[in-house]
Amino acid sequence: MNPIAADPRDQSAERFLRLVQARRRGTLKVYLGLAAGVGKTYRLLQEAHDLHQHGVDVLIGYIETHGRAGTVAELKNVPSLPRKQVFYKGHAVEEMDVEAIIQRRPQVVIVDELAHSNVPGSRHEKRWQDVEYLVAQGISVITAVNVQHLESLHDQVLKITGTDVTERIPDQLLKQADEVVNVDLTVGELRTRLEEGKIYDPAKVPTALANFFQAENLLQLRRLAVREVAQLLGRQVESEAGGAPAVAPQRRNDDRLLACINSNDRAAKEIIRKTSRLADRFAAAAWYVLYVQTGRETAERIGLATQRHLLNNLQLAAELGAQILRVKDDDVVGAIRRVAAEKNATLLVCGITSEKDWWGQLSRRGVTSDLLRAVAGDGSDLDVYLVTY
């Protein structure tokens, strides 16, 4: 008689339970999906039930059911924490009660909508910061997010869907997670769920199908989600094969990437995000972001808005894992070459506008074209990667 096969959900719960018991620091598990409606929240609640049945003290900290009957049904039999009401501009807003979770101190807390922005005045600006705080306090968290909310993918998602996703999480959060699970669904199945009214209100369905939920959009988002989880799993396997603990820094290779930005807000963001993705593909290569401040870009000569954008971009680079370099020099090309030599850079990442005549741009004098000529003429092994914006 054949033995009864173990339920994969039970195995998942047991594996996560072993992680919970192995550390004083809380563990972090993330369900990553390609879009709304693939079943992330449902999977969160399924795992909550599984852990609860294993005797784990699990608490629902925040769940967004969107009124979906199947999701609402899964809320039964698992302890749930009441939401905190915060008054903002005369309206009552419900938020996750972080202080109550800390006081209650469950072993595991379920937190949905990871990319959510908290109401002003909350302990943290973003929910992902709440999650980091809970994990640091020794409470394990299981959470969920869609791939379009990853910071480094913002520009790609904008080009794919035409949607400017404003709520984003730093990639570093996923890299630090103990487990990332891809919640996958075929494009056809997802669009069918949408058409059947299982994701949005029926009145919103035609607009969603014609815009964000176009088949080609979903196909590309699915590819991004699968690739992201595969890369994270690859790094985890490599780390475990080397005998290193899961929280240890990832092994870096010999490649060093130097991203060159100026005060152009949009260009800088695209260059930073692209370099972050490249560094991941280069087996977690070290990377730097260099800003060369010329005499024309002193604080007295550029506006406050430009200064603010520059500081925000440097902060973005730091959040994505870059080391920030700032130098003052009117010879931008010379400064870039000098810093590249000092840091033993192997790849320069620069920007170029996406005009039709991009070859003409390179033929004209400018920082990027002059840098290309200089690198080509000095016989070095330094390569240049151009990012269009």
Image (spheres, helix red, strand yellow):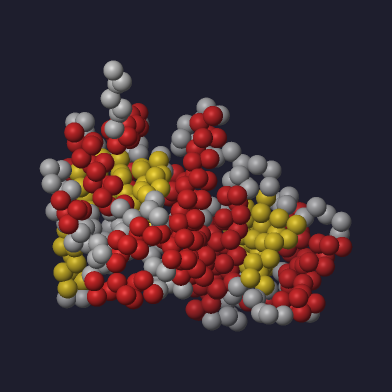
Q: How many marks?
A: 0
Residue at the (14%, 53%) spot, across then down: 82
Q: Is residue 271 left or right of residue 41?
A: right
Residue 55, image quadrant: top left
Provide residue 255's location: percent of width, then percent of height. Answer: 68, 47
Residue at the (54%, 29%) spot, across then down: 241
The residue lying toward the viewer, choosing from 42 and 248, is: 42
Q: Is residue 276 left or right of residue 37?
A: right
Residue extending furthest toward the front? 1
Q: Can residue 116 be seen by looking at this rendering?
A: no
> Which quarter of the rendering shows the C terminus?
bottom right
Q: Is residue 262 left or right of residue 128?
A: right
Provide residue 308's location: percent of width, then percent of height. Answer: 49, 73
Q: Can residue 9 be seen by looking at this rendering?
A: yes
Residue at the (64%, 67%) spot, across then down: 387
Provide residue 21's location: percent of width, then percent of height. Answer: 31, 29
Residue at the (28%, 25%) spot, across then down: 4
Q: Is residue 115 left or right of residue 253?
A: left
Residue extending furthest toward the top? 1
> Which quarter of the rendering shows the N terminus?
top left
Provide residue 370's location: percent of width, then percent of height. Answer: 79, 71
